[in-house]
């Protein structure tokens, strides 16, 4: 058994190994006309693997044929509707997205929260800064409870806030944040709306329906229902 790691590397891995094998087989066909028809069939399959709705665009059709020649290492001799691309073509070079390898002190809070705290440090002292810090502290507590469903002491949040701000933000130990149960209830409501958008609305409809039914029942208690005549 031969593993993929022992096989030749794929020139364009998005098409898979079977397409590359088909191209290699097409290159062994001696008759040029048959070789061209085989290449056309391969391009049709490549189009289905990509986006068949874009087949009518000139750029997309040429792109498929360019990929065909590239996967053949520019050795496929056929009658193509487009010229063979240059061997130094740069269109397939993938620019690697540099992953931000930044240190995050507390991963449950994320990098955005650290930026918020850094911005709060720059605020001039006053009521506005105090309100912002308190808002951030409550947000930290809510994020903490998203990962840890148990209760958390406010002192823990104060310590984390101080560490993230390098000691520039220190809340008084007498400061009290939002109650744990209130924050957990807020997180649960958000999950209900986010994960199942219809559940919250359906519950409201069902609640309204029950209210109407109870209202009608109460209104009819002295009439038909009370007499046992139910229509």
Image: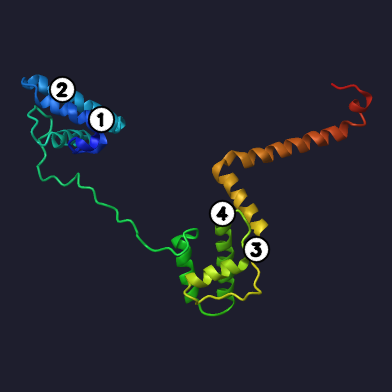
For label 3, the crowd category at 10 Å Cα-Cα, with few meaning under 14, some 14 to 19 and many 20 or more, is: some
How many angstroms separate mark 3 from mark 2 (CA)?
A: 69 Å
Left of 27 or right of it: where is 60?
right
Q: How many marks?
A: 4
Pick whichever of labels 3 and 2 is earlier in the sequence: 2
Comparing marks 4 and 2, which lies closer to the viewer? 4
Q: Residue at x 59, y 39 (%)?
A: 198
| Residue 47, disc | 1
Badge 2 is on which residue?
38
Pick whichever of labels 1 and 3 is earlier in the sequence: 1
Residue 85 position by quadrant: top left
| Residue 146, disc | 4
What secondary structure is found at the residue carrying circle 1?
helix
How many angstroms separate mark 4 from mark 1 (CA)?
A: 45 Å
Pick whichever of labels 4 and 1 is earlier in the sequence: 1
Pick whichever of labels 4 and 2 is earlier in the sequence: 2
Relative height, residue 118 to residue 98 (above, below) = below
Residue at the farthest bottom position: 125
Q: Could you tell me residue 39's position as x and y percent?
A: 15, 26
Q: Residue at x 68, y 38 (%)?
A: 205
Task: Please state which of residues 61 and 170 is positioned toward the viewer in this rendering.
Answer: 170
Q: Could you tell me residue 160's position as x and y percent?
A: 53, 68
What secondary structure is found at the residue carrying circle 4?
helix
Badge 3 is on which residue?
178
How many angstroms separate mark 3 from mark 4 (CA)?
A: 14 Å
Q: Are marks 1 and 2 in contact (CB under 8 Å)?
A: no
What secondary structure is found at the residue carrying circle 2?
helix
Pick whichever of labels 1 and 2 is earlier in the sequence: 2
How many angstroms separate mark 1 from mark 3 (CA)?
A: 56 Å
Comparing marks 1 and 2, which lies closer to the viewer? 2
């Amino acid at each position: 058994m031969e593993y993929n790691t022992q096989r030749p590397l794929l020139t364009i891995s998005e098409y898979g190994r079977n397409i590359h094998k088909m191209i290699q087989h097409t290159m062994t066909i001696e008759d040029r006309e048959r070789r061209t028809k085989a290449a056309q069939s391969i391009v049709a399959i490549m189009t289905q693997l990509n986006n068949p709705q874009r087949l009518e665009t000139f750029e997309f059709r040429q792109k498929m044929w360019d990929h065909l020649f590239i996967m053949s290492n520019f050795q496929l001799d056929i009658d193509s509707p487009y010229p063979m691309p240059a061997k130094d073509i740069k269109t397939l070079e993938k620019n690697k997205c540099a992953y931000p390898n930044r240190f995050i002190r507390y991963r449950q809070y994320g990098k955005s929260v650290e930026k918020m705290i850094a911005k709060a440090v720059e605020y001039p002292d006053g009521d506005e800064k105090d309100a912002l810090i308190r808002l951030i502290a409550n947000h930290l507590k809510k994020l903490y409870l998203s990962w840890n469903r148990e209760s958390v002491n406010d002192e823990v949040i104060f310590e984390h806030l101080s560490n993230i701000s390098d000691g520039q933000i220190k809340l008084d130990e007498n400061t009290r944040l939002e109650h744990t149960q209130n924050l957990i209830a807020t997180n649960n409501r958000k999950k209900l709306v986010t994960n199942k958008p219809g559940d919250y609305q359906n519950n409201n409809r069902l609640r309204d329906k029950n209210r109407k039914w109870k209202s009608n029942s109460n209104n009819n208690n002295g009439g038909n229902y009370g007499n046992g005549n139910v229509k």
